[in-house]
Image: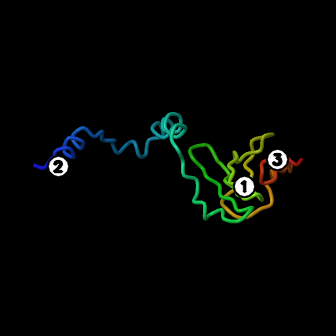
Amino acid sequence: MSVQASVEKRLIDRAVRIGNEAYVSPDYARAEAERLWPRVWQIACREEEIAAPGDYVTYDIAENSVIVVRGQDGEVRAFHNLCRHRGRRLTEGCGNRKGFTCPFHAWSWDLSGACLA
């Protein structure tokens, strides 16, 4: 057996296997949301998806939603996808906008995240 094959066999023998229940268990999903997702990098979108100023995508992970947007200055920014007043979601999906407005009471933010009203 080659050295490479020996190393691979040892790695496989030590591997932790996750039971099938983990893929459908609400308890497992809750534990991931609390202990895993806050500690690892997330890929919300590719830069090409928000190429022009005003382009945005929303990214949802567990109970969190984020807006990733390209500003008028060309910078990429990310914001919580909720209104600071009542926690209402600001947008869904993707598109192009000049800003974001809460559908509940019309508070508005520009692409830099500044509250306009």
- Residue 116, horizontal then vertical, whole percent: 88, 49
* 66 to the left or right of 114: left
Quadrant of the rendered image containing residue 95: bottom right
- Residue 7, horizontal then vertical, whole percent: 20, 44
Residue at image mark 2:
5
What residue type is disc 2 on?
Answer: Ala
Numbered disc 3: secondary structure: loop
- Residue 2, horizontal then vertical, whole percent: 13, 49
Quadrant of the rendered image containing residue 75: bottom right
What residue type is disc 1 on?
Answer: Thr
- Residue 12, horizontal then vertical, whole percent: 23, 44
Task: Name the residue: 84% across, 50% down.
Answer: 108
Figure check: 40 above or below 60? above
Task: Name the residue: 74% across, 42% down.
Answer: 87
Residue at image mark 1:
91
Q: Who comes first in sequence, dot 1 or dot 2?
A: 2
Mark 2 packing: few (<14 Cα in 10 Å), some, or many (20+)?
few
Please, which residue is most extreme toward the left here?
1
Return the residue nearer the eye: 88 or 10: 10
Q: What is the distance, in whole Å, between disc 3 and disc 2 at their CAs? A: 57 Å
Nearest to viewer (mark 1 / mark 3): 3
Quadrant of the rendered image containing residue 48: bottom right
Task: Name the residue: 53% across, 44% down.
Answer: 41
Q: Which mark is residue 12?
A: none
Tag 3 and tag 2, C-beta contact below 8 Å: no
